[in-house]
Amino acid sequence: MRACVAVRELAASRYEVWRWAPTQRDSPVAAAAADDDADDDARAMAKRKKTARDGDGGGASATATAAAAVTNAGGSNWAALKAKIGAGTTPIAKKRAAEKRAMEDVTTTDGRAGDDDEAAAKKPRVTGKNRSVTRVLALDCEMVGVGTDGKRSILARASVVNEDGHVILDTFVLPTERVVDYRTAVSGVRPKDLLSANGAKSFQKVQAQLSELFNGRILVGHSLKNDMKVLMLDHPKKDTRDTSLYHPLTRPLRSDERCVPGAPRGRGCRALRDLVAQHLGLVIQKGEHSSVDDARAALLLYQKFQRKWENSLRGREKKSSK
């Protein structure tokens, strides 16, 4: 019992000593340092409040911005925290956000421009300096739709290039019937293009010009029967070079297809853009078509296979003459 009392008295005396012993916090130096820290904190807080007030044009604007952030985020905890602390409302935060948006816009624009530039660089180009009407000419036409359903075609644009790819004729044509479908997404033709005030010529005039140009010359094109149909013209078979019918440029006929008149037996036609991409590494018909580009593309295909093509025709003539 005496031992327990002695232990309690000893513990009590030690507690009193600890309680009244001077600590670092009670020292004059520590107290002065604490006062200085408090003053620094107060000044820093006042500076932050002034910066936010000057950058936002007042506390009301910051509050409204924060409230809108909460509303747009559906009341999430993160949105509430951002609204409470005014995240993104300081001048520095606004500047960084503007810079980020500007960089995103530049990246997107540059990407599109890069694609367009690449496609433009791969289009068929002029290959020589000869601008005269040569022995070989290439033709392509654009059509628009007429009739009750717009499925019947009439001529809207005709383009002819010489063997170096220079344009001999390129003109829009006044419609001979009311246009129901301009087919702009493919043809590139718009209503304003088919006005005489904008240079469109009458069908009869264009037809006469082309008939004279083609006379006695080799005519190159892709699916020429469609172009000649809307032109209401004929051209001798021996002087026609249709890249859609030349055997090496065709494909096996599908089971549900019928052979196109003039095509090799059991063979089907391929799209001009696919042939050009495969054999020439060029890009056409990416979006609206250009009859000048398509005429040049057909010409370049013919010229690539010209020697073999012409030799095969001469071989057929010899066989038929025997």
Image: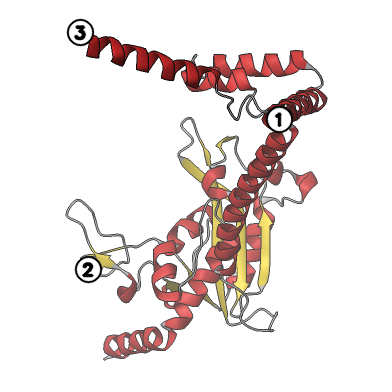
The residue labelled by disc 2 is 265
Which residue, as the protein is rendered here, is positioned at the far front?
2
The quadrant in which the C terminus is found is: bottom left
Characterize the local packing of mark 2: few (<14), some (14-19) or many (20 or more) Cα atoms within 10 angstroms: few
Nearer to us: label 3 or label 1: 3
Residue 269 in the image, given as x and y percentages of width and height: 33, 62
Task: Tell me the CA gap for discs 3 and 2.
Answer: 124 Å
Q: Is residue 236 above or below residue 285?
A: below
CB under 8 Å between callouts 3 and 1?
A: no
Asked if residue 292 is positioned above or below residue 314 in the image, the reply reads above
Count of marks overlaid on the render: 3
Residue 239 can be seen, yes or no:
no
Residue at left 20%, top 65%? 266
Quickly name the residue at label 1.
37
Q: Is residue 51 left or right of residue 11?
A: right
Is 49 above or below relative to 238? above
| Amino acid found under the numbered disc labelled 2 | Arg
Q: Quadrant of residue 99?
A: top right
Q: Amino acid at mark 1?
A: Asp
Residue sitting nearer the eye, 90 or 227:
90
Q: Is residue 240 left or right of residue 101?
A: left
- For the residues labelled 3 and 1, the Cα–Cα distance comes to 52 Å
Q: Looking at the picture, tell me which residue is in the foreground, 263 or 111.
A: 111
Image quarter where the N terminus lies is top left
Q: Is residue 50 visible?
A: yes
Residue position marked by numbered label 3 in the rendering: 1
Name the quadrant containing residue 132. Answer: bottom right
| Helix, strand or loop for disc 2 | loop
Q: Residues within 10 Å of mark 1 (few under 14, many from 20)?
A: few
